[in-house]
Image: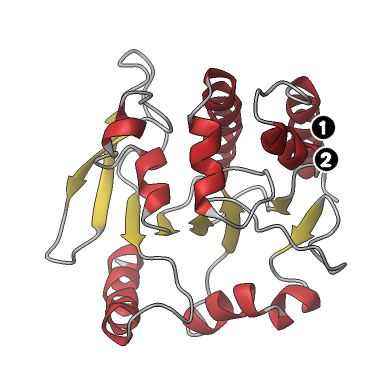
Amino acid sequence: MTENNLQFQTELNQLFEKYQDAFELPYLNEIVARKPLFSETPMTAEVLITSINPSYRKRQDHLSAASYDFYSKAALKDAYFKKYHNLFKAYIEHYNFAYLDLFYQRHTEQKDLKLFLSEDQGVQFLKDQITLSRKRIQQLSPKLIFVFNRYAANFWDLKPEKGIYTQAPWLGFTYETISELDGLYRITGSLLSNKIPEPLKGNLVYFSTFLSYRTSKKALQKVYDDIPEIMKIIEK
């Protein structure tokens, strides 16, 4: 594991230890006790694929450890990661890709994330993770970010839902639309500070639905149609 990933692992473990047994709901303490899971990333990446948090798998596999490699043989065979490699197969050899989740606690149901949002400690736990994720994203400095989860868009501060809006800002980016492509935005600045320039200003973010067997053919076709058009923009 590279030095930057070892450092991140240390910070993440310290954060999870801080919140062990810190919640009113025993189930949330159980989730935190599963330990965090993160994707190892390079120092920089031209394209960043993101979602919201790792699923919890009871079986032992390549995601049972503390970290994983998006490019590993195990990931290439994994149904979840394989879809991204297939989706970007025309570009993945020509661009430096990376993958990360915004949060690192292991659970499969989205409603579990809402349980964290129901407690003050849970909100702070998520915000502390967002702080680490924001730093990682800035260090990676991707020209293009894909957010494949509609609910995750709330934590990117793109028109957050009412309950989440009251806790905003999260990642704290501001945006402008730049084309006729629905879901494509350019980062214009930061909600967190107007004194420090936003390192990702000018970079692109594409917000889309979560890709699974439940995704409609229409929604999936839109993603396949949009990607070549988006890639043309960063190729200019």
Q: Position of residue 8 (x, y in %)?
A: 74, 36
Mark 1 secondary-structure assignment: helix
Mark 2 secondary-structure assignment: helix
Q: Position of residue 165 (x, y in %)?
A: 30, 30
Q: Dot 1 corresponds to which residue?
A: 10
Q: Position of residue 168 (x, y in %)?
A: 35, 26
Q: Amino acid at mark 2?
A: Leu
Taking 194 as reference, is 145 above or below it?
below
User: Is 114 placed left or right of 174 in the picture?
Assistant: right
Taking 86 as reference, is 139 above or below it?
above
Q: Position of residue 102 (x, y in %)?
A: 55, 44
* Residue visible at 57% across and 64% down in the picture: 96
Q: Residue furthest top?
A: 195
Q: Nearer the viewer, residue 99 or 64?
A: 64
Q: Amino acid at mark 1?
A: Thr
Tag 1 and tag 2, C-beta contact below 8 Å: yes
Q: Dot 2 corresponds to which residue?
A: 6
Q: Nearer the viewer, residue 58 or 71?
A: 58
The image quadrant of residue 12 is: top right
Quadrant location of the C terminus in the rendered image = bottom left
The image quadrant of residue 158 is: top left
In the image, which disc is placed on residue 203?
none
* Residue visible at 33% across and 58% down in the picture: 207
User: Is 33 placed left or right of 116 in the picture?
Assistant: right
Taking 65 as reference, is 112 above or below it?
above
The answer to whether residue 93 is visible is no
User: Is 179 placed left or right of 144 in the picture?
Assistant: left
Q: Nearer the viewer, residue 228 or 108?
A: 108
